[in-house]
Image (spheres, rainbow, N blue to C red):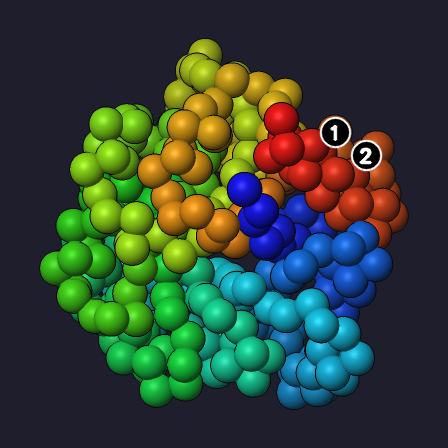
């Protein structure tokens, strides 16, 4: 099975948008993700990336992250959707820290309506360190919203830590999942406190095949050939590969090797 592979922006957290995209192109990815920090992103950032996109056939898979917060309007998050549209992105990634599911539903629906106008599809990602902690909770929100521009995203680390089972995934239509993020880790985490889960998510991930997560089993229940975005947020990988392109290439090679075996 051949999968398009996208460079997750989270693999290069210390680099600027253009550097992330250049690393994806240099390393040989099919696609690139893009982290949109609205506090620093300018019109010139968009123009610079569009010029780079014109010179390459590597497209933008997703823009992230739109974070729904309690007591806050999602209006400002729509700028990320608009930036994604300008860059030709396929998807926008949404998470929620609002403890009220009804608020998350309203916010996600509002964002989906805006995304539909500019041609993006939004994915809601469950993480145990947010208020949408597992795939069942995310599915309930997205299915209740019922908007054609609203889908789901699996990250194999969060899938495992959120307690979702393969049996649950088997019961869900693969149509909900337009792409997938993969990372490896031990099957269990010794103490699943917020602090430990956060540390593992941003600093402790392993390359595909280095851990025990059921990545291959997850892929069996998803659409064949869907885009795969290896998200290896790892202090060890960052220290070993301080150069953006070399780090991106090391992750790509490990992912290709895993998928081929």
Residue occupying image coordinates x 38% and y 70%: 121
Q: Is residue 169 left or right of residue 241?
A: left
Whether residues under marks 1 and 2 lie with C-beta atoms below 8 angstroms apart, the answer is yes
Q: Is residue 244 left or right of residue 149?
A: right
Observer able to see residue 244: no
Residue occupying image coordinates x 81% and y 34%: 239
| Count of marks overlaid on the render | 2
Residue occupying image coordinates x 36% and y 78%: 115
Per the model, the C-alpha gap separating discs 1 and 2 is: 5 Å
Residue 26 x %, y %:
83, 58
Label 2, on which residue? Answer: 239
Q: Is residue 229 above or below residue 250?
A: below
Q: Is residue 143 above or below residue 79?
A: above
- Along the viewing direction, whichever of 204 and 208 lies nearer the viewer: 208
Residue 258 x %, y %:
63, 30
Observer able to see residue 57: yes
Label 1, on which residue? Answer: 236
Q: Is residue 153 left or right of residue 231?
A: left
- Along the viewing direction, whichever of 114 and 180 lies nearer the viewer: 180
Q: Quadrant of residue 86?
A: bottom right
Residue 242 x %, y %:
85, 43
Residue occupying image coordinates x 85% and y 45%: 246
Q: Residue furthest front?
A: 1
Image quadrant where one finds the C terminus: top right
User: For numbered disc 1, what is the local secondary structure?
Assistant: helix
């Amino acid at each position: 099975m051949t999968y398009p592979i996208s460079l997750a922006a989270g693999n290069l957290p210390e680099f600027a948008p253009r550097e992330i995209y250049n690393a994806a192109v240099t390393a040989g990815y099919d696609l690139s993700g893009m982290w949109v920090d609205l506090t620093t992103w300018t019109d010139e950032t968009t123009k610079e990336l569009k010029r780079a996109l014109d010179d390459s056939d590597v497209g933008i898979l997703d823009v992230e992250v739109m974070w729904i917060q309690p007591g806050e309007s999602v209006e400002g998050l729509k700028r990320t959707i608009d930036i994604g549209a300008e860059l030709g992105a396929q998807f926008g990634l949404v998470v929620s820290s609002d403890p009220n599911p009804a608020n998350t539903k309203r916010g996600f629906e509002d964002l989906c309506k805006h995304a539909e106008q500019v041609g993006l599809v939004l994915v809601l990602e469950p993480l145990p360190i947010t208020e949408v902690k597992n795939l069942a909770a995310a599915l309930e929100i997205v299915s209740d919203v019922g908007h054609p521009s609203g889908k789901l995203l699996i990250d194999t680390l969060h899938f495992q830590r959120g307690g979702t089972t393969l049996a649950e995934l088997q019961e869900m239509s693969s149509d909900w999942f337009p792409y997938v993020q993969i990372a490896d880790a031990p099957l269990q985490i010794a103490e699943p406190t917020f602090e430990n889960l956060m540390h593992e998510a941003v600093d402790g991930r392993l390359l595909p095949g280095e851990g025990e997560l059921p990545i291959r089993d997850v892929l069996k229940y998803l659409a064949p050939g869907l885009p795969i975005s290896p998200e290896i947020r790892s202090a060890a990988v960052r220290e070993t590969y301080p150069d953006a392109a070399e780090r991106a290439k090391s992750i790509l090679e490990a992912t290709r090797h895993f998928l081929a075996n």
